[in-house]
Image: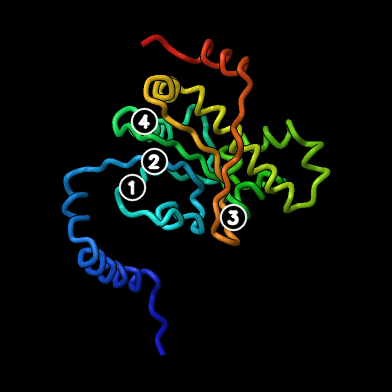
């Protein structure tokens, strides 16, 4: 028996999905054709096991998305910066989610020392975090160290997000919420990390990064 090519099969599934969705929710596609009003900006890993709309059990139009390897926020990354600007300033999303996940290949790579070409440049922030927390990470078993670096990366990402004026302005003027999540690929469940920040740190951050209106 001939094996069906994954891509050909996916195109067939798309036709079936479009017909089924149109039947179940006749207004969905006509509404989406008129524009989008997502309430969530999701910044996650490119990993195939972390499809945000599927795992949130949402629909097209519900989530604006940026995904990259290991969900890293680089202050100078034009792509993620443009997505964040558009989602926060123009779409006026109510929630920004930064989501890491278990068994992340980018995290594993940054905890190893194999040369990976251009990926080494991309993963540099993870190596910087590794270096800052080396003692703690070295004291953990491989899986625990990976999970810890996932957490540290998300915390660092949230810190960088909160240095962006567009985010600070939206937090102040309309209560934009920032969420740090970890997705467990072994069971499909999301966990939110606590985000308590001392009053002094919030003051220092606003004084340093909030620009004039
Ligand atoms: Zn990943």
Q: Earlier in the sequence, mark 3 or mark 2?
A: 2
Q: Nearer the viewer, residue 135 or 182?
A: 182
Residue receiving disc 2: 40
Q: Secondary structure at mark 1?
A: loop
Q: Using the rendered image of the protein, determine whether residue 124 is visible from the camera's viewpoint.
A: no
Q: Secondary structure at mark 2?
A: strand
Mark 4 residue crowding within 10 angstroms, few (<14) / some (14–19) / many (20+): many
Cα separation between marks 1 and 3: 22 Å
Q: Position of residue 185 (x, y in %)?
A: 57, 58
In this rendering, the answer to whether 194 lies above or below 20 is above
Q: Position of residue 126 (x, y in %)?
A: 64, 38
Task: Point out which mark residue 62 bears.
Answer: 1
Residue receiving disc 3: 184
Q: Earlier in the sequence, mark 1 or mark 3?
A: 1
Residue receiving disc 4: 88
Cα separation between marks 1 and 2: 7 Å
Cα separation between marks 3 and 2: 20 Å
Disc 1 + disc 2, Cβ < 8 Å? yes
Residue located at (38% from left, 34% from top): 94
């Amino acid at each position: 028996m001939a094996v069906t090519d994954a891509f050909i099969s996916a195109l067939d599934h798309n036709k079936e999905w479009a017909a089924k969705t149109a039947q179940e929710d006749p207004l969905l596609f006509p509404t989406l054709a008129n524009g989008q009003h997502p309430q969530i900006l999701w910044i996650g890993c490119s990993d195939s096991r972390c499809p945000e709309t599927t795992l949130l059990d949402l629909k097209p139009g519900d989530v604006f998305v940026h995904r990259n390897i290991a969900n890293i926020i680089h202050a100078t990354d034009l792509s993620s910066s443009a997505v964040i600007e558009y989602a926060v300033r123009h779409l006026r999303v109510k929630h920004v989610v930064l989501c890491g996940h278990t068994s992340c290949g980018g995290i594993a790579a940054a905890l190893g020392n194999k040369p990976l070409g251009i990926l080494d440049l991309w993963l540099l922030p993870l190596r910087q975090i590794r270096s800052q927390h080396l003692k703690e990470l070295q004291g953990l078993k491989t899986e625990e160290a990976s999970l810890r670096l996932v957490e540290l990366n998300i915390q660092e990402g949230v810190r960088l997000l909160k240095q962006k004026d567009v985010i600070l302005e939206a937090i102040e003027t309309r209560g934009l919420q920032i969420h740090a999540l970890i997705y467990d690929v072994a069971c499909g469940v999301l966990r939110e990390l606590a985000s308590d920040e001392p009053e002094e740190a919030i003051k220092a951050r606003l004084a340093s990064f909030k620009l004039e209106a």
